[in-house]
Amino acid sequence: MNSFLHTTLGHGLLKAFLLSSRYRIFSSRTVHAMEFDLLRAKARKSMRKAMTVPASPRLHVGCGSRKVKGWLNVDITGSDQDIDLAAGFLPWKDAAFEAVASQHVIEHLELMTELFPLMRELRRVCKNGAEIWLSCPDLEKVCASYSIDRAKGLLEDRDRHRDADAGMDGIPTQHYINLLMTQRGEHKNLLDFEMMQWLLGENGFSECQRVGEKDFLARFPEFPQRSDDSQTLYVCAVAN
């Protein structure tokens, strides 16, 4: 059954079943999770090929719709090279990259079973001295925001700088903390600087520094501005 579901026919039949059962058998969150797992299975199938030399020495992890020129933009679907970040391996040869960048992606991975293996693999595919730049919601900032003003400042900043509607009309502002923590079931963990230092250090990266978006954009101006410093932890480190 498992092998059948990985065929084109099996994948199509399961997707049709999920669509037909939406809001009838499964909750919308469960349907979304199963649809995402189908994309993961499809991406993993494409990753079974032999280790390859990437098209660019710069890796943009979890690009979403923000493809950056001059980088290898990877994600679960619709990217330059679709991959499953939780697969436990990456489809490139050792020491293939001189720079890695990822914005608001690692919080979607479970810490020990998904994120740790990914970081080990990123170190493997990084050259010695390669830079890694990561960002995620800042656990320290998010927790502090509750005591300061029940997250009112964070929500106002988001509304000022980002197009997406947080869906908070009429809801007490502290609920925005729940959204940052869970993103309706998509977030697995948030990190603070101390945890980020530990994560990188345990997986072969050193010289971890807390930076800001302005530092990231000064280094890589080709990336689009997010204006998310108020809620985001930015760090950079070096593969040693």
Image (spheres, helix red, strand yellow):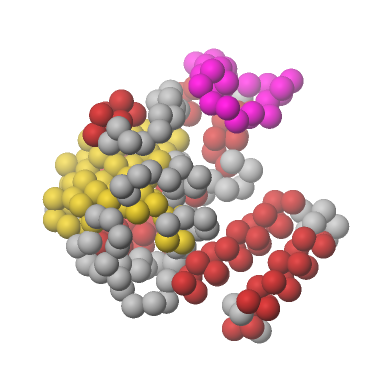
Above or below residue 179? Residue 151 is above
Q: Depth check: 123 or 146 in front? A: 123
Front residue of 47/192: it is: 47
Left or right of 213: which side holds 29? right
Whether residue 200 is visible: no
- Residue 192 shown left or right of residue 174 in the figure: left
Q: Residue at x 36, y 49 (%)?
A: 60
* Residue at 64 percent of width and 57 percent of height: 33
Whether residue 213 can be seen here = yes
* Foreground pick, 205 / 150: 205
Compared with 32, 157 (above or below) is above
Does the magenta segment cover residue 160?
yes
The image quarter containing residue 181 is top right
Image position, residue 22 (x, y; %): 80, 57
Q: Picture coordinates of residue 119 (x, y %)?
A: 32, 56
- Tell me if residue 178 comes above or below residue 49 in the rendering: above
Q: Is residue 165 left or right of residue 100?
A: right
The x, y position of residue 222, in whole percent, is 33, 36
> Measuring 70% from the left and 56% from the top, which residue is drawn there?
30
Q: Position of residue 221 (x, y in %)?
A: 30, 32
In the figure, is residue 127 to the left or right of 83?
left
**Is the N terminus in the top left, top right, bottom left or bottom right quadrant?**
bottom right
Which is more toward the observer, 151 or 32? 32
Residue drawn at x 46%, y 42% as measured from the top left? 66
Total count of labels: 0
- Height in image: 191 above or below 37? above
Q: Residue furthest front?
A: 69
| Chain part drawn in magenta | 146-173
Q: Is residue 109 magenta?
A: no
